[in-house]
Amino acid sequence: MSGEPVIPEFNECILCGKCLEVCPVFRATNREELSPRGKAYLLQELTRGKLLDCARALELCVLCLSCGNCVRACPQGIDLPDILARVRAEYLGLRPLAEWFEDEAYLRPWLGAYRESADEPSAVERKLKGIGTSQALAKEPGLEPRVELQISGPCLSPGKVLFFNGCTANYARPDWSGKVLRILADLGLTPVTEPDWACCGFTFRMAGLAHEAARMREINIDIWRSAGRPRILTICAACRAGLSAYADDPGIFKPGEARRWRDSILPLAEFIDGVGTRVLPGARPIVYHKPCRANGHDPDLAWLKTRLKTGVIYRAVPGMCCGMGGVLHSQAGDLADKVAENCWDTLYVAGADVVSSCGDCLIRLAETRPEDIRVGHWLELIG
Amino acid sequence: MSENSRLKSEHRKFLRDLFPGEDCLFSAEQTLIYGVDAGRVFYPPWAVVRPGSPDQVAELLRWADAERIPIFPRARATNVVGACVPKGGGVVVSTLKMNRVLDIDPGNFTAVVEPGVVTGEFQREAAEMGLFYPPDPASVRICTIGGNVSTNAGGMRAVKYGVTGDWVLGIRAVLPGGHVVNTGGHSHKNVAGLDLTGLLVGSEGTLAFMTRIVLKLIPAPAATGTLMLGFSTLDAALNAAGAMLGAGILPTAMELMAEEVLECLAGLGPVPWPGQTRAVLLVKLDGSRAALAEDLAGLRSLAAGFRPCFVEQGIGPDQEEPMWEMRRLINQASFRLAPDKLSQDIAVPRALVGRAVRRIRAVGEKHSLPVLTFGHLGDGNIHVNVMYDADDPEQAEKARQAIEDVLALVLEMGGTITGEHGIGLAKLKYLDMQVPGFERDLMHRLKAAFDPHSIMNPGKGY
């Protein structure tokens, strides 16, 4: 760590503006200085020695949801969330963020579980309570079942499975884990082991806590290797993206192992793809919120559309984001709120059940939802 | 704030009072991006403001004229000729908060929008009501109606539907000094007095600040279809295109992508055409379902005579969009060849476009630099990207010379140095090649009538 920022090299931003279509922070505010183009240009000019105040420039640049939409849009392949994560990791001026993320204890109050804890709230927990983190998701009543699995025999994909329940299920909604285990048992799967996973580490890496994120990665890969490199079942798009990203760093896996790691990570929707279903009646409209990290093909949306057909509403609008991502929520709550507001402008259908496949999104959606809306994981729709 | 700023503390106070909070920026860090556009040449702004209402714009222009402070209107800044950059200093005014679609009227086939409305989003909204706003520059998903009107933007559908100016019925704008003018109106035909709407369209922000635009709409075509044809020689592609146009079918769009462009696109991701392809034609048709089917079949049969090595057809947006998206990515993809480009968007009389493409490519060979040729074959407007490394003085000189050669041959063929992008800043030095002194002086006199103190985007366009 140093007093001066170390800005990683990146391909030149050609200022084409393609990122403006998809950046949720820009779309919610129309402030070009907060767009990926604006930030990339600022970082570029900093490295070229333009007379700019480094601290002020970086304060602007780090107002980022780490959603990755700009990365997918950029013809120059500039990965701004990754660049910012590395700047945060190196730049002394941004270290105060670390106190928010000392360890996984950060996650418990975030996920609404701290009141259940018998321990005295930590300093971190008190701080997070202070900024209004709510337990909304933990308090959501659960959704009415709308689809029934018609299980008529052994599991279509036999073999060992590790279940990666993810931090949200772990701390805030253990009922999700319970449901998955029941489904798998009904499918006649060999015992699904539940190891003591660490968090996937994505948020920690985005916050610049590269060492902490690396520690979590090591724990999780060890578990997988010790179990014989089986399939890993996930129910969260953020977990899936965070785990898959381990394979992006060279030197983590042995030759050929990285690909095997990626191929092992399976979403539940693909796992139960071969199981028949029957639609159950229900009055409330069902609206799907696509998480930023379910980029490209979204297996959960695909499953819902196949099974519920017109019974699930999905409006594809570029740059929609719940506003949770990265560390924006803890750094700039007002901005994160604007992003959420923008999201609800598209998402809202009166009296709807809003479902998603990402634990982070669901925390945020539950926190920001209009009165008449209920929020839950799409899993909850399975009767 | 820029070191050269002429803004005094009372000026800054005025701006802060008129544009509270985050809508008034002074720091170098916050204003940096506002000093540059897709033309990639930077000048530092003195300040950036973001109006949310026409009243703020009027008050701003009243003040700016009185204080002689230059004003630089800016939307999404996808402009490639530096028309948005605050050369010489001044206040950059972002229109992005003025982004409401105020009305879409299916009975009158009109719409009223604020300048910051994103063109592609407006098209989608109109389409939901069965209405069609055709102009579609390649940046359609990012750019704004205000930006399009300022440059009289074209796009791929121009061959059938014309350019932005053909769809503007009226404009409300604020003049320097704060007076609000309304040009044109809501009638589809309107010839009362001089055509001030026409004058504002394409004026690159040099005459007035638009706050609302009345647009014409038509019923959405029932069906659309696209043919993508790959040829193993450029000549075959150009000849096929000529035959198609000569057969009496007016395509919605006809685009050419020549050899080097195909290589660049292949560098961005998988491409559908086989390795021996040297030129691709993209042809779009629209109309009733029956007419579309017949016209597509007719074109396929015509094209077959020129032995395409690749033929793909798409019906409807889901199938067509991936084909057109490749075309839209060319400008960005071109940077795979070299870090810098000098781009021109020349246009020649339609019958001469094949000859122009061949001669332009010969210029590239002469100077040993990659020259990408692509674009609106159907209406004679071809984009020319000379790719080079600006850090290499020899290449920079060759690139400059190549551009001059291209422009000279285009003008010799009776064409224009810019079909769509405008003059902005980047092409001012070439304007004299096309526009004689008297006509240019006439333009300045007209500007003086609108903007006597020359505060509106000074030094641009003409």
Image (cartoon, coloured by chain):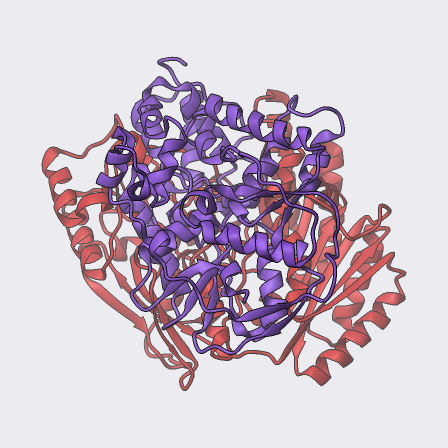
Task: Supply the letter of whichever chain is red.
Answer: B
Tell me the quarter of the picture where residue B59 sits: bottom left
User: Measured from the top left, where is residue B75 in percent x and y?
Assistant: 38, 51
Q: Nearer the viewer, residue B189 or B91?
A: B91
Q: Nearer the viewer, residue B321 or A132?
A: A132
Q: Quadrant of the N terminus of chain B?
A: top left
Position of B160 with respect to B163 (left or right) is: right
User: Measured from the top left, where is residue B450 in percent x and y?
Assistant: 27, 57
Tell me the quarter of the picture where residue B350 sits: bottom right
In percent of the image, x 86 and y 59: which residue is there? Answer: B308
Q: Is residue B42 above or below residue B446?
A: above
Q: Residue furthest top?
A: A2
Q: Is residue B163 above or below residue B411?
A: below
Q: Is residue A45 above or below residue B237?
A: above
In percent of the image, x 52 and y 28: which residue is there? Answer: A216
In percent of the image, x 32 and y 39: which residue is there? Answer: A117
Query: Number of marks in the image?
Result: 0
Q: Residue furthest left?
A: B10
Determine if residue A20 is in view.
Answer: no
Position of B184 with respect to A17 (left or right) is: left
Task: Supply the letter of whichever chain is purple.
Answer: A
Determine if residue B386 is in view.
Answer: yes
In percent of the image, x 30 and y 45: which residue is there? Answer: A335
Q: Nearer the viewer, residue B106 or A200?
A: A200
User: Measured from the top left, where is residue B455 in percent x and y?
Assistant: 26, 46
User: Measured from the top left, where is residue A242 in percent x and y?
Assistant: 54, 38
